[in-house]
Image: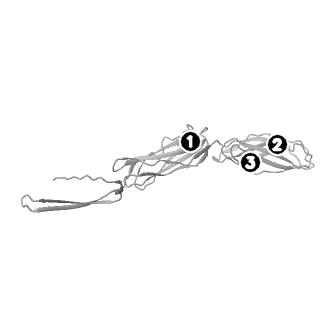
Amino acid sequence: NHVFEWIYKTEQDCAGQDAKFTATVEGKDENSQLDKTATDSFTLTIKPKTDLLITQLEIQPKQISCGQDVLVVMTVKNQGGVKALGVTPFLRLEPENLNIILPDQPTPPSADISPGETPNYRWTYKTQAGSQGTYNFIGNASGIDEKSSEFILSNEVTSEPLTIQIPAEIVVQNVVVKPDSINAGQPFKVIVTIYNEGEATAEGVTIRLEPSLVVKGLNQIFPGSKNITGKTYEDFIWEFSTTEESAATLSFTASASGKDQNSGRNILTQDAK
């Protein structure tokens, strides 16, 4: 036996095509001097090499309060024709913040990806006090081409912004009676001012208002609930009517309650007069 070898090089634009090779061997029989010929052929399918593409880098939710977790999902597609081995995703946060705790590794840490497959990788980040700000996640992925053993690196993508806010925190700023002196039978108002010290919206804020005495003939119209955005004030106004039997000296105690719009955490003020 004797082996003849040819080495062919392929270009990237050959991918997806078939190459047919036909080999013919000619010679003479040493004894009879008769011509001898043998022919064989085969077809080689040239597959596109591994090509990793990150099709999605999503954060859920996109706005949170300090102390909440955020889920990051990366979708990686093998748009080549060869399996990618040990595909490992990489993710970084910009700008960096030590109060945002990066998990040790995603789920799954790595995966083999066949042509056309689109697995997801997931990270859960934990936040704590001091993590407020606006951030982006930047990621890519790498693996090994099963056929050529070449190192393959995907594109790099940037997520939509993640906003982390200081949690909503409401306080009773003022409790004011207007006018502060009336005759029995006249109307008056009580204005309670609530301030949201946080950045997250305080949702569905309601007020509990209690007079210091039970007074006959004192009727009131309650204000509804309100949403209070971060670092802003809202006034809640009660309108009272009185009768000739309502003569008294009164003071009012107010408190407020609501929820952090991002986390759903219940928030409650202390009583104020």
Q: Residue at the location (53% across, 50% down)?
A: 58
- Can residue 75 be seen at all in this image of the molecule? yes
- Can residue 87 be seen at all in this image of the molecule? no
Split into 4 quadrants, where in the image is the C terminus? Answer: top right
Q: Which residue is mark 1?
A: 126
Q: Position of residue 96 (x, y in %)?
A: 54, 39
The CA distance from mark 2 to mark 1 is 42 Å
Element at label 3: strand
Element at label 1: strand
- Identify which amino acid the numbered label 1 is placed on: Lys
Is residue 150 rendered to the left or right of residue 119?
left
Is residue 93 rendered to the left or right of residue 39?
right
Q: Which residue is mark 2?
A: 176
Label 2 packing within 10 angstroms: few (<14), some (14-19), many (20+): some
Is residue 52 rendered to the left or right of residue 58?
left
State how many labels appear.
Answer: 3
Q: Is residue 171 above or below residue 52?
A: above
Q: Earlier in the sequence, mark 2 or mark 1?
A: 1
Disc 3 vs disc 2: Cβ atoms closer than 8 Å?
no
The quarter of the picture where residue 199 lies is top right
Q: Earlier in the sequence, mark 3 or mark 1?
A: 1
Q: Position of residue 208 (x, y in %)?
A: 77, 46
Label 1 packing within 10 angstroms: few (<14), some (14-19), many (20+): some
In the rendered structure, find residue 206 and report the number of the disc placed on it. Answer: 3
Q: Residue at the location (58% across, 41% down)?
A: 127
